[in-house]
Amino acid sequence: MAIDIHWIRDNDSLGQLCAEWQHLPFVALDTEFMRVDTFYPIAALLQIGDGQRAYLIDPLTIDNWQPLAALLENPAVVKVVHACSEDLEVLLRLTGSLPAPLFDTQLAAAYLNLGFSMGYSRLVQEVLGIELPKGETRSDWLQRPLSQTQVSYAAEDAVHLAQVFTELQPKLSADKYRWVLDDGAELVANLRREVDPYEVYREAKLAWKLSRAQLAVLREICAWREREARARNLPRNRIVREHALWPLAKTQPDTLSALAKIEDMHPRTVRQDGDFLLDLIKRAASVAADQWPPAVPEPLPIEASVLLKRLKAVGQAEAERLNIAPEIVLRKKTLESLLKSGFPNGPYQLPDSLRGWRRELMGQALLDSLATAGEQP
């Protein structure tokens, strides 16, 4: 079946169509972008599906995104996406806005127990019985003109995404539909939360092995790396490679030759930023003890795996009762945060990451499971 494709290449056309879309119950939304050697994604194409047609928006020829921003923010129009974390970055950078309400078909599939983290092609095959051609995701989406294959691929995405939504949405109970939107809202909220460069060190590999004095050095290096990646629009690893962070903070080199010997230290980094890094390390190493960051908690010991299993069982039982994919019920990171709050002997506290229906339906059961763990023979 031929797809009705409409190109949008100027501000007036975009404004006119966005005004029309404001009256629809939903729009399907997808993006194509390039992110090979940049920190931020470069928008190359936006696709909108209204259930009938595919609209291809060319971001290389449009500079007024206010009408699309207004559509994204309209609470009466559901924005349908699939596995959208990077799409959200593209939209935020392009329009300054994020979609709400957000319906992610990958989440919906999990709530309908079709599968967890399903790829788009597999979901289309499962729901619509359509086998999509192999993707064009690795092709150059910034080239103009786009190839006919690229155009077809992009248009099919928009049309089929709308069709998947119309199939899945009626199958969701009122509760599950609300949960899909709640999870979508959480994705949006997480992206809106600007990462504090001075908190990045907590996620660095092996940070828990460092003393508080060494963490002060790691904190400065990670904060500088984060700021520079954004300012230079380069991937973080182009500033300082991930595996070099820990040995930098641990050994604190004071000469360029010592810096060059750091594990996984790129010669380009030594050449471009070596002197600055040495000075940064020296200054960070001299801060007063009362300014050292708190110790990073150690990973849970192997003995905790028994308790982790008990907690997972709570989630699996709830998943069976609700007939949803167990992986979406309780995230491993959330359960680990719960255990870290009181391991080994308690008391335990529910982490902030356990929110909404999950906290309401399983919060007390998780705490009860830990409270009775010591009573098991």
Image (tube, rainbow, N blue to C red):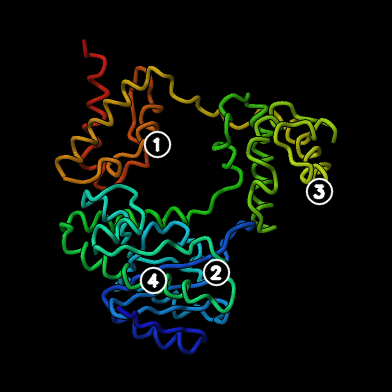
Judge depth for marks 1 and 3 and give the one in front: 3
**Total number of numbered discs in the rendering:** 4
| Residue tagged 1 | 333
**Quadrant of the image for the C terminus?**
top left
Judge depth for marks 4 and 3 and give the one in front: 3
Which SS class for mark 4? helix
Dot 3 amino acid type: Gln
- Dot 4 crowding, Cα within 10 Å, few <14, some 14–19, many 20+: some
Give the distance between the C-alpha atoms of the residues marked 2 and 4, in whole angstroms.
27 Å
Give the distance between the C-alpha atoms of the residues marked 1 and 3, in whole angstroms.
37 Å
User: Looking at the image, do the residues carrying marks 1 and 3 touch, with CB atoms under 8 Å apart?
Assistant: no
| Residue tagged 4 | 73
User: Looking at the image, do the residues carrying marks 4 and 1 touch, with CB atoms under 8 Å apart?
Assistant: no
User: Looking at the image, do the residues carrying marks 2 and 1 touch, with CB atoms under 8 Å apart?
Assistant: no
- Dot 2 crowding, Cα within 10 Å, few <14, some 14–19, many 20+: many
Which SS class for mark 3? helix
Upstream in sequence: badge 1 or badge 3: 3
Task: Name the quadrant containing residue 184.
Answer: bottom left
| Residue tagged 3 | 272
At 30% from the left edge and 55% from the top edge, which residue is drawn?
182
Relative side of 2 to 200, left or right: left
Instruction: Indicate whether 173 appears above or below 352.
Output: below
At 52% from the left edge and 75% from the top edge, which residue is drawn?
147
Q: Is residue 291 visible?
A: no
- Dot 3 crowding, Cα within 10 Å, few <14, some 14–19, many 20+: few
Give the distance between the C-alpha atoms of the residues marked 2 and 1, in whole angstroms.
35 Å
Dot 4 amino acid type: Glu
Residue 17, label in figure: none
